[in-house]
Image (spheres, rainbow, N blue to C red):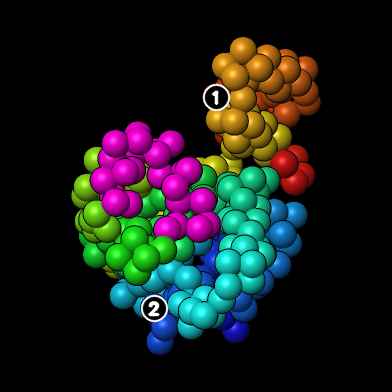
Amino acid sequence: MSVVVERDGAVAVVRIDRPERHNALNADVLRRLHAVMTDLPGKARAIVLTGSGRRAFSAGADLDELVGLSAADAEPVLRAGQAVLRGIERSPAPVIAAVNGLALGGGFELVLACSFAVASTEAAFALPEPGLGLIPGYGGTQRLARVTGPAAARHVMLTGHRLDALRAYELGVVVLPPVHPDALRALAVAQARKVAGMGPRAVRAIVDAVDVGLDSPLDDALALETRLAADAVGGSESDEGVRAFKEKRRPCFEAVTP
């Protein structure tokens, strides 16, 4: 299997398992990721996505499947890859990237599609496509600028500059300081458990608000936030959350899919 799933209570760990190819994203991996990410949100409240081994999270698209394609043939392949990453970005169960090594090209784009990322000290990030006469095609030209700002994104893409884990943290690509490789999975799972312990409907509403808001005028995004926040105030989930807060206990949210 090119994609392996392990369960850890309310958390699922999804591992790209092609270490001999640096976990490259070929068509089979993308199909399996799509199937797994479509199925898991009904069974897990948070997902950790990582790669097998310590060398690579994912070294990107499998070039053997792209070389020689015409523009007409390449477009549906790229659209399919974009659709898989868009599905991860919009997953009802937030997806946390645990970047264990190289995240290059499509692998970096996969990280950017996740809800947020943590990394080991051995992680590195780059979009080297221009050196091959290519450009990022799985959303990298759009998502990186939204994370780092346009100037840093242009520099990374136009020069092929490789970010080490610390620089990625400074730019906001990863949200916590990098940790020793042996501690990465525990960190990622701990973060996923925190997410899984939140109100599932509230988590889903935040995912929707951020995702839609990024593509909307501010007034429209604020109107969406108001509606979603009002739904949360009027929902039974908030009744339990507020009651638990007043009683100084952990909330016990009903086991529902966000």
Asked if residue 221 can be seen in this view, the reply is: yes
Q: Position of residue 68 (x, y in %)?
A: 52, 80
Question: Which mark is on residue 248?
Answer: 1
Q: Are marks 1 and 2 in contact (CB under 8 Å)?
A: no
Q: Position of residue 7 (x, y in %)?
A: 60, 66
- Local SS, label 1: loop
> Compared to 204, does 141 lie above or below?
below
Q: Is residue 146 above or below residue 184?
A: above
Residue at which label 2 appears: 22
Q: Name the side, left or right, on which 38 lies relative to 95.
A: right
Report the magenta residues as a range: 135-158
> In what quadrant of the picture does the N terminus appear?
bottom right
Quadrant in which the C terminus is drawn: top right
Mark 1 → mark 2, Cα distance in angstroms: 47 Å
The residue under the point 59% across, 30% down is: 215
Left or right: residue 193 versus residue 237 is left
Q: Give the SS element for disc 2.
A: loop
